[in-house]
Structure formats: structure tokens, C-alpha cells
Image: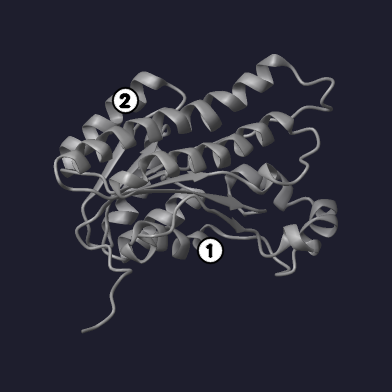
Amino acid sequence: MTYKPFDLTGKVALVTGGNGGIGLGMAEAMAQAGADIVIWGSNPDKTLAAEGKLTNHGVRVKAQIVDCADEAQVVAGMAEAVTAMGRVDTVIANAGRGRGAPSFAEMSTEVWNYNMALNLDGVFWTLREAAKHMVDRAKSGDPGGSLIGIASLAAIEGAARNEAYAATKGAVVSMMKSIAVEHARYGVRANSILPGWIATDMTAGAQGNDKFNTNVISRVPMRRWGTPEDFGGMAVYLASDASRFHTGDSFLIDGGYAIF
């Protein structure tokens, strides 16, 4: 018999912020592994384009316009996804944003709340609604599921002038560990992924900055920016039966930056 633990055929994966960047990179990899895909995005045009790209992989795809910083939209969106797809086996809370300040002393409450609204509150609401569905399935005799929170290198390194963003990402790591312990009895795993310096729309300004590339990217042992495709393998692993006993962990994907 062929070893096929990474085959996602029959599974459904939902990715918030799945219309671009790391989210789309993960969604594409899971689709190529056979999973049906749900993506959430707040930009209709961008989300529609991503839906078309994912459909080319021959799996069922559902695109939803959901602002994860709005609790009501998250609750309604998860219910709609479960109804449309029949189930959701993996949920990746990836939607996020960042805004810093000239200094910590000058950081406004508005900047703090801006980061919290999507990066922490949105992740909480998304995973809470996913957990409800997975626990209900388990109680009906269908245990299992994978919850994934996208944190950041900033969760474990000192991110000067970005304390609000770093606080949200550190909180995600802690939240995933707590979710893992509570939900293991239902066969539900919970893990976090910490991206380093990745070339996405969020880092577009830094990518073209020669000083930044010289001072920061040159320190990455892999000597390059990460790409959304670099997260595909981890997404497939965590969505698959290959990780069925792997929970409460944090995966740092940064090309070795944190250890150099």
C-alpha cells in the first residue's frame, strides 16, 4: 500500500486572507494536494481573482467576502462555509495587518486598536467559530480537525516601534497552545506558524528599500526574501493526517533569520 498521509482528498480547508500573499500560497498548495478550499477576503476583485486561480486545480472552491475584524461577519461567514461545503477540517487564521509608530512612546491608542482588531480579535473569532463546528462534529462521532494561527517572527524577536503588532502575534502563539490542550480530546490540533521576512503586499515598501535589503535581508542565512510558496508544505502537513499527533507547536519559517 502506498503511503499517502499528505493526500487531502475529501478534506475542506478555510483560509482567511486567502486571496493573496501567504494565505493564497497555502490555499494553492492544499488545493494541489486535493483539498476543497474556502477563502475569505475583504477585497472583492482580489478575492474573485484568487477564486479563479484556485479553481484551476480541479477542486471545489468557495470565495467569501468577510472582514475578519467584524465579529458578526466572521460568525456568519463560518456558518455559510460549513453549510456550503458540508464540513470544514482545517482553518487557517491568516488575515492580518500591521501599523507601527515613530516610537513606543509616541504610539497612539488608535494604532494599538488597529492592530488588535484584526490580528488578535479576528483570529479569536475565526478560531472560536471553527472550534464550535469541530467540537460538534466530534460529539457526533466525527472527531478531528486542524486549527492554525499565523503569528510572526515579531512574536519572539524585539520588533522596535511595532510593539502593538508584536503583542498580537505573541498572543496568537499563546492562544494556540491553550486551544491545543483544551481540544485534543476532540482530535483537534492547534498550531501556529511564524513567518519571517516574506515578500507580500504587506512588505512591498521594504522590498524596494536598498538599505533594508542590505541591513536585514542580507542577514537571512538563505540570503533572500521568503515567498508565499514557502508556506505550502507546512500548510499541507498541518492539514493532513501526517500531523495527527502534532499539536501545540510553533513553526518558525524565516530562512534561519532568528538563529543567525
Q: Residue furthest bottom?
A: 1
Percent coordinates x, y for residue 19 in the rendering = 42, 45
User: Based on the displayed image, in which of its 4 quarters is residue 237 positioned?
Assistant: bottom left
Q: Residue at x 62, y 60 (%)?
A: 226
Percent coordinates x, y for residue 171 in the rendering = 59, 34
Q: Residues within 10 Å of mark 2 (few under 14, many from 20)?
A: some
* Model colouring: one colour
In the displayed structure, 180 sits above or below 250; it is above
In the displayed structure, 245 sits above or below 155; it is below
In the displayed structure, 135 sits above or below 61; it is above
Q: Residue at x 21, y 43 (%)?
A: 138
Q: Which of the pair 164/57 is nearer the observer?
A: 164
Q: Is residue 134 left or right of residue 223?
A: left
Q: Residue furthest top?
A: 109
User: Based on the displayed image, in which of its 4 quarters is residue 185 positioned?
Assistant: top left
Q: Quadrant of the C terminus?
A: bottom right
Q: Which of the pair 175/169 is nearer the observer?
A: 175
Q: Earlier in the sequence, mark 2 or mark 1?
A: 2
Task: Check disc 1 and report its element: helix, strand or loop.
Answer: helix
According to the picture, the residue beneath numbered tag 1 turns out to be 230
Q: Residue at x 66, y 42 (%)?
A: 155
Q: Is residue 159 left or right of residue 12?
A: right
Q: Quadrant of the N terminus?
A: bottom left
According to the picture, the residue beneath numbered tag 2 turns out to be 75
Percent coordinates x, y for residue 221 in the rendering = 74, 68
Which numbered dot is residue 38? none
Task: Check disc 2 and report its element: helix, strand or loop.
Answer: helix
Percent coordinates x, y for residue 90 in the rendering = 33, 49
Q: Is residue 207 left or right of residue 227?
A: right
Compute the Cα span from label 2 to label 1. Answer: 30 Å
Q: Amino acid at mark 2?
A: Val
- Of labels 2 and 1, the one closer to you: 2
